[in-house]
Image: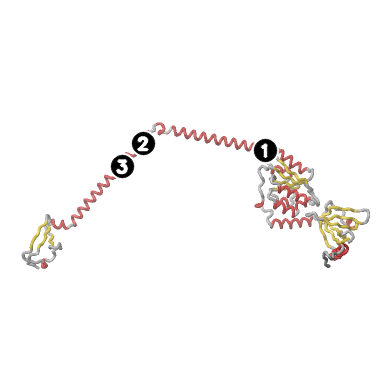
Amino acid sequence: MFETSSQAPATVKVVSEAIKEYVERLGPIWVEGEISELNERSGVMAFIRLRDASEDISLSVMCHKSVIAAVKPLPANARVVIYAKPSWYTKNGSLTFSAREIRQVGVGELLARLEALKTLLATEGLFDIGRKIKLPLLPKRVGLICGRNTDAERDVVENAKRRWPSVLFEIREVTVQGAAAVAEVSAALRELEADSDVDVIIITRGGGSFEDLLPFSDESLVRLAASCLTPIVSAIGHEKDSPLLDLVADFRASTPTDAAKHVVPDIREEIELISGLRDRARRKLINLIDLEFARITNLKERPVMKDPHLLITSRAEIILALRDRSYRSFGSQLKLAKEELVGIKARIRTLSPQATLDRGYSLVQLANGQIARDARALKVGDLLHLRLAKGETNATVTANTVKE
């Protein structure tokens, strides 16, 4: 490590040699990527461009032709792991890797990785039904991401226009397999997502091998699709194919034709539906009118409509009957009350002092109004008030002879 400044800068040679020293300390490493370019020149060396499948980043790799021969035949855009040692060339400032061994990544290993990624994304909830966005009934404009001049594009466009002739498309033709597929599909998806006129996006391609469909299981592309607010329809391959994009999309179509059928309605079916609803509404309205006419007819046939006074006379009879009934009820109650009053009066008379007076007794009161109860308390000359059965009189005590 060395220090520099604007007054004491390092020369290009010193910097280049420092980088070389640092890189060579790294030693041989295993690197995974896709072979985007393979050039076997006339000599004994071969040159490879190794690209990252999810990013637009590549490395230059050279190796002996015997290393390539050990893994031939290699399919286009083969995914490999390379055991290589990095080297820095000080003269031109370039980094290259010298490969000592190349191994093609097997389908089984890729399946295991995809299954692990699928489990991870499912755990994060990216496949949940609650995240799905409902497709619009009639989109203003359909975004279409497809290969260049492919049958999948024609299937979607022709079937959609056959169902709804005025449907509009915003088409993005991209690479749909190989090293550049993820980057181009992602860029097209971002562009269509940003377009406010696009109501739904279809991502489609025809069938292919497991390796051909791998870009549509790329983690970055799947996460990008999950973050989109515009509904996404995935129509990748055939019914048996199931890339991870199918699981995160808002609707998974089995084929490009199936995608067109679900994105736009059939104009004939819609016309028939509207006609059916119109006929149903007409029948409903006619039935309501007929019902109201029947109600009016029934009202006109009622007796009160023929003789308007009937309502008054029938009510008058009811009122008279109620009045007579109240009279009878009130008279009966008065009679019972009168009889009860006579009985009470008789009982009171029987218990009253007057009844005692009627039998010949009298009530003697002193001048102060008190009742005389003891003859011995009376004195000659005391004035007494006598109450008889009939009438009242006064008396004076002339003698007080008390008999035991």
Q: Residue at x 57, y 35 (%)?
A: 282
Q: Position of residue 139 (x, y in %)?
A: 68, 43
SS category of the residue bearing label 3 = helix
Three-letter amino acid code at the position of disc 1: Ile
Q: Position of residue 208 (x, y in %)?
A: 79, 48
SS category of the residue bearing label 2 = helix
Which comes before the other along the chain, label 2 or label 3? 2
> For the view shown, which residue lies furthest in the front direction?
7
The residue under label 1 is 267
Three-letter amino acid code at the position of disc 2: Ser
Quarter of the image where one finds residue 368 = bottom left
Which comes before the other along the chain, label 2 or label 1? 1
Q: CA distance from mark 1 to mark 3?
A: 76 Å
> For the view shown, which residue lies furthest in the top direction?
306
The residue under label 2 is 314
Q: Are marks 2 and 1 in contact (CB under 8 Å)?
A: no
Is 65 situated left or right of 399 in this image? right
Q: CA distance from mark 2 to mark 1?
A: 65 Å
Instruction: Choose mark 1 or mark 3, whichever is in front.
Output: 1
Q: Position of residue 29 (x, y in %)?
A: 83, 62
Quarter of the image where one finds residue 16 = bottom right
Along the line of sight, which residue is nearer the eye, 258 or 94? 94
The crowding category of the residue bearing disc 1, from other C-alpha atoms within 10 Å (few below 14, some 14 to 19, many at least 20), is some
The crowding category of the residue bearing disc 2, from other C-alpha atoms within 10 Å (few below 14, some 14 to 19, many at least 20), is few
| Applied colour scheme | secondary structure
The residue under label 3 is 325
